[in-house]
């Protein structure tokens, strides 16, 4: 399974958690949510998408599933 945005958002969440914990020894849980109201892919992102052979995942009505093949 490949989820391209996870690399960026996972790193962002890790950075936020690390900065927040500072010198604390740990935490029971850290919840981070990211919301996007729009997205405008760059030309480079579109080209990557055209040659990407991985199936796309979508979240629809609270369920994760494969996107319909185009």
Image (spheres, rainbow, N blue to C red):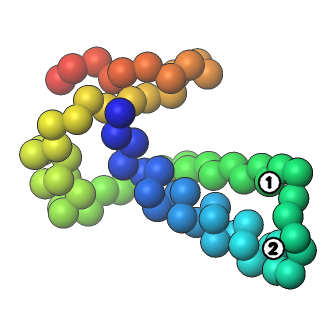
Name the quadrant containing residue 16.
bottom right
Residue 66: give x, y in percent of width and height: 36, 21
Residue drawn at (26%, 62%) of the image: 42
Q: Are marks 1 and 2 in contact (CB under 8 Å)?
A: yes
All told, the count of numbered labels is 2
N-terminal of the two: label 1 or label 2? 2
Q: Residues within 10 Å of mark 2 (few under 14, many from 20)?
A: few
Report helix, strand or loop for mark 1: loop
Is residue 57 shown left or right of residue 48?
right
Q: Which mark is residue 30?
A: 1
Residue 65: give x, y in percent of width and height: 43, 19
Judge whether 1 appears above or below 38 on screen. above
Name the quadrant containing residue 18.
bottom right
Residue drawn at (69%, 49%) of the image: 33
Residue drawn at (82%, 80%) of the image: 22
Disc 2 marks which residue? 20
> Where does the N terminus fall, quadrant-wise?
top left
Q: Nearer the viewer, residue 53 or 60?
A: 53
Report helix, strand or loop for mark 2: helix
């Amino acid at each position: 399974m490949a989820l391209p945005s996870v690399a960026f958002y996972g790193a962002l969440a890790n950075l936020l958690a690390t900065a927040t914990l500072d010198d604390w020894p740990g935490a029971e849980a850290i919840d981070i949510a990211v919301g996007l109201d729009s997205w405008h892919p760059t030309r480079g992102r579109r080209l990557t998408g055209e040659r990407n052979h991985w199936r796309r995942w979508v979240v629809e009505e609270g369920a994760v599933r494969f996107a319909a093949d185009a």
